[in-house]
Image (spheres, rainbow, N blue to C red):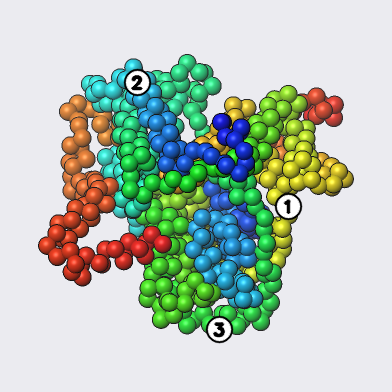
């Protein structure tokens, strides 16, 4: 994102209508992909009725038409919303949740969901909430143990586990 | 009175300790879910659905539907005390609810809104009790073409009732259909849109999409708004409750009006949000104190809440009778039915009599218990919102991740959840409606099956949908609904030409103003 370099007070960025237009373009591409892939399977009328691709092919076609309409409206419509879609300061807040969440999902695959959850909740509270160490540790570990008891012991739903759980014999 | 007998049988089923316990757990969880930002009816039910796979279906549906009632009640708590709508359906409640709380009348507002909700819900359940069996009996003569036509009507009326962004509704819906089509084709067994990726074979599960769009997406949106909750105290004592109840009969007209609007919007998939706005708008228009709305009128709290709850409840009518949900949460519940091995559709009332009537009986009981529960414990639940967001947010994300994983025990689903969270964030900010996507995703396969079964055999074509008067009239009605905005526009242009400054020229404008507000 190029807003990164811009000073905070001059927070530039995409306007609502621009994001609207870009979204419409993405939707259009999705529609085209659907049409192409289903055309491959067959979209015509076979002897026993429509072929497998008939339905999704037309769904893709409607997607394309509707996205063109939204695109035109977002660029030439009367009530265009030229406000900034999201200012950098606010987007930073969003990223502060999004990036740790992505890391969390990655860590789940390495050490299992319980350890990852305890780390994630702890880090989130400590870094974003600036909550005291003791409280952070108590809540993050307490919640995780509660979840473990509920899913693993009560409902016996198998969740991804890592080396630590293996140590306890699970 | 077959229905009453069946209903008593249902009560018999519900009144076991296990089921009553499930009901209570569901209600408490529902209120918590409704109060928390980022968790609402649809994704709350979606996250807990995997836990019910091993339960008896009756207990499972009682718990999950009670989560739904609880979350509907809870929407009012955050709207009135914190000026933050916990559910989109309670946006209209903030208009008069928060001013009342500022004047120190939070107790009255809460009591009024809960009682209104209860009245609305009760009417919805009564409607279901007596109308749903009739509808399902009528629908027994439906074949695939009729079913496709009813599906078509459902989706077309979504588009037709959306005055502001019909094309965005279409896009959201078609994305849902597209997602539903991914994976193995149910008729021919061929693969569609898997792009050689074997993990896509089983398709994208709607639960994962719901958790992503409504859970993670909502967290991102509320994070951006930098949540800082400053709530009013929500103490309720018996005096305030009785005092408010004494006032309630005065507003009987508003109650009835909102109930009718809500039931109508619930049965046709207009949704609780539209119903609450309409209920509020109508009350404002017809009330003698309408000009004071927005400054703290009890009536302005009763009207939207009654309509929202009536609509939320009656959304289960088409779900039970036809297998077509009227709201996003009902769609998730319907998905649950299929997972528990029940076949949704008009046969449900015949084949799963006990299940259906136990659910209906639990709706009477659940809403009554829910009313008592929220009236007695509001301060407790309001305290949840005072927990710092930095503690609540990661816990919600963890619960969402567990929910997404446990659907299929697949790590890929957790990544999908994240992806749909981002998509949900963007779409929500661009005011794409998300409920049509969920409905299309849940119903997509069945709609396509109905279409293709109708087309089986030689000499078929689209004319099948006009082959008899029943299917013909449903299809025509659907197309009428779809093009309604266009028809209305043309009508206005034609009428408007001769006398533009006449009284007719003004009428549509004021009408649109009320609906859009």
- Disc 3: host chain: B
Relative to B443, is B455 above or below?
Answer: above
Disc 3 designates what residue?
B246
Of marks 1 and 3, which one's residue comes earlier in the chain? 3
Relative to B322, is B498 above or below?
Answer: below
**Tag 1, which secondary structure?**
loop
Residue B346, given in percent of the width and then of the height, sits at 38, 48
Q: Quadrant of residue B496?
A: bottom left
Image marks 1 and 2: residues in contact by CB distance under 8 Å: no
Relative to A4, is B275 above or below?
Answer: below
Disc 1 designates what residue?
B388
Name the outermost residue toward the right. A134
Quick one: B121 or B88, which is closer to the camera? B88
Relative to B444, is A48 above or below?
Answer: above
Disc 2 designates what residue?
A36
Q: Is circle 1 on the same chain as circle 2? A: no
Q: Is circle 1 on the same chain as circle 3? A: yes
Mark 1–mark 2 Cα distance, whole angstroms, equals 49 Å
- Disc 2: host chain: A
């Amino acid at each position: 994102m190029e807003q990164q370099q811009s000073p905070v007070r001059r927070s530039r960025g995409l306007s609502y209508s621009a994001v609207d237009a870009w979204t419409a373009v993405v939707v259009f591409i999705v529609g085209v992909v659907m049409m192409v892939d289903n055309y491959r399977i067959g979209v015509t009328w076979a002897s026993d009725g429509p072929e497998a691709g008939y339905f999704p092919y037309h769904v893709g076609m409607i997607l394309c038409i509707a996205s063109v309409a939204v695109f035109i409206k977002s660029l030439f419509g009367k009530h265009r919303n030229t406000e900034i879609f999201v200012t950098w300061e606010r987007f930073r807040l969003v990223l502060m949740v999004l990036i740790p969440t992505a890391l969390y999902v990655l860590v789940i695959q390495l050490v299992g969901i319980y350890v990852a959850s305890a780390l994630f909740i702890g880090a989130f509270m400590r870094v974003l909430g600036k909550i005291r160490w003791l409280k952070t540790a108590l809540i993050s570990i307490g919640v995780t143990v509660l979840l473990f008891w509920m899913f693993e012991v009560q409902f016996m739903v198998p969740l991804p586990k890592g080396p630590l759980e293996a140590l306890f014999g699970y | 009175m077959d229905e009453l007998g069946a209903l008593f049988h249902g009560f018999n089923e519900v009144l076991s300790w296990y089921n009553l316990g499930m009901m209570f757990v569901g209600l408490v969880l529902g209120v918590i879910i409704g109060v928390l930002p980022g968790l609402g009816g649809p994704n709350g039910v979606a996250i807990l659905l995997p836990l019910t796979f091993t339960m008896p279906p009756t207990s499972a549906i009682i718990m999950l539907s009670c989560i739904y009632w609880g979350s509907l009640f809870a929407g009012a708590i955050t709207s009135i005390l914190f000026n933050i709508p916990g559910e989109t359906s309670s946006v209209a409640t903030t208009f008069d609810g928060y001013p009342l709380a500022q004047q120190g009348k939070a107790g009255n507002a809460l009591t009024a809104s809960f009682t209104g909700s209860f009245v609305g819900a009760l009417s919805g359940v009564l409607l279901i009790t007596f109308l749903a069996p009739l509808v399902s009996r009528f629908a027994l003569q439906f074949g695939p073409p009729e079913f496709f036509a009813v599906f078509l009507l459902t989706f077309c009326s979504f588009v037709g009732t959306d005055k502001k962004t019909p094309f965005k509704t279409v896009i959201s819906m078609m994305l849902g259909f597209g997602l539903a089509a991914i994976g193995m084709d149910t008729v021919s067994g061929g693969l569609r849109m898997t792009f050689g990726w074997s993990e896509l074979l089983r398709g994208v599960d709607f639960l994962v999409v719901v958790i992503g769009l409504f859970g993670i997406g909502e967290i991102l949106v509320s994070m951006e708004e930098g949540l800082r909750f400053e709530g009013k105290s929500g103490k309720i004592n018996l005096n305030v409750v009785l005092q408010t109840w004494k006032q309630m009969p005065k507003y009987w007209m508003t109650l009835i009006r909102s109930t009718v609007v809500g039931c109508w919007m619930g049965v046709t998939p207009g949704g609780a949000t539209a119903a609450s706005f309409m209920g509020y708008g109508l009350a404002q228009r017809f009330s003698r104190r309408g000009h004071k709305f927005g400054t703290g009128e009890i009536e302005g709290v009763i009207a939207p809440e009654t309509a929202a709850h009536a609509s939320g409840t009656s959304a289960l009518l088409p779900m039970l009778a036809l297998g077509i949900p009227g709201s996003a949460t009902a769609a998730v519940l319907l998905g649950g039915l299929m997972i528990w091995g029940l076949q949704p559709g008009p046969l449900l009332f015949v084949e799963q009599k006990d299940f259906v009537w136990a659910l209906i009986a639990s709706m009477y009981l659940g809403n009554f218990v829910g009313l008592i529960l929220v009236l007695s414990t509001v301060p407790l639940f309001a305290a949840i919102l005072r927990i710092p967001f930095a503690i609540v947010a990661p816990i919600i994300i963890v619960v969402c991740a567990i929910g997404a994983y446990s659907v299929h025990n697949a790590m890929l689903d957790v990544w999908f959840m994240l992806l749909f969270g981002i998509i949900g964030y963007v779409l929500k900010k661009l005011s794409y409606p998300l409920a049509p996507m969920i409905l299309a995703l849940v119903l997509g396969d069945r709609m396509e099956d109905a279409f293709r079964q109708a087309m089986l055999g030689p000499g078929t074509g689209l004319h099948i949908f006009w082959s008899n008067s029943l299917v013909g009239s449903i299809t025509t009605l659907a197309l009428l609904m779809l093009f309604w905005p266009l028809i209305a526009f043309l009508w206005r242009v034609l009428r408007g030409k001769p006398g533009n400054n006449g009284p007719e020229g003004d009428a549509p404008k004021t009408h649109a103003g009320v609906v859009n507000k």
